[in-house]
């Protein structure tokens, strides 16, 4: 698998307990734990990730 650039939410940059995401190959998004990056990752189809983000963004925070 090619090396991917993982990013954290701009809301989480100072926090140490976050998830990170990276655009993957084969139309997927990879998600991993920022405190244990060697533990592996979860690959989510891009369409499912987009639906998840749409749902989260549609909800009030807090």
Image (cartoon, grey):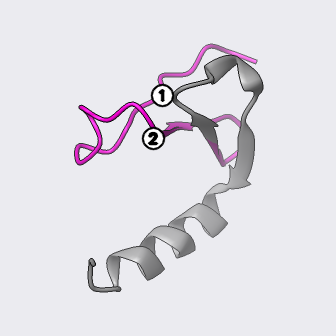
- Kindly identify which numbered label has been placed on residue 6: 1
Q: Could you say which quadrant of the image residue 17 lies in?
A: top left
> Is residue 53 a member of the stretch shown in magenta?
no
- Estimate the x, y position of residue 60 in percent, counting from the top left: 27, 85
Residue at 34% over, 76% down: 57
Task: Look at the numbered disc 2 and give the secondary structure of its residue.
Answer: loop
Residue range of the region highlighted in magenta in the rendering? 1-30
Task: Look at the numbered disc 1 and give the secondary structure of its residue.
Answer: loop
- Kindly identify which numbered label has been placed on residue 18: 2
User: Furthest residue to the bottom?
Assistant: 59
Counting other residues with Cα less than 10 Å from the Cα at mark 2, is it few (<14), some (14-19), or many (20 or more)? some
- Estimate the x, y position of residue 14 in percent, counting from the top left: 24, 31
Closer to the chain start, of discs 1 and 2, is 1
Vertically, is 50 above or below 46? below
Vertically, is 31 above or below 34? below
- Is 29 left or right of 5, judged from the image as shown? right
């Amino acid at each position: 698998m090619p090396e991917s650039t993982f990013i954290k939410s701009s809301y989480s940059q100072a926090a140490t307990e976050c998830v990170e995401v990276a655009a993957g190959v084969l139309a997927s998004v990879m998600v991993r734990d920022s405190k244990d990056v060697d533990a592996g990752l979860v690959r989510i189809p891009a369409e499912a990730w987009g639906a998840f983000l749409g749902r989260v963004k549609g909800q009030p925070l807090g």
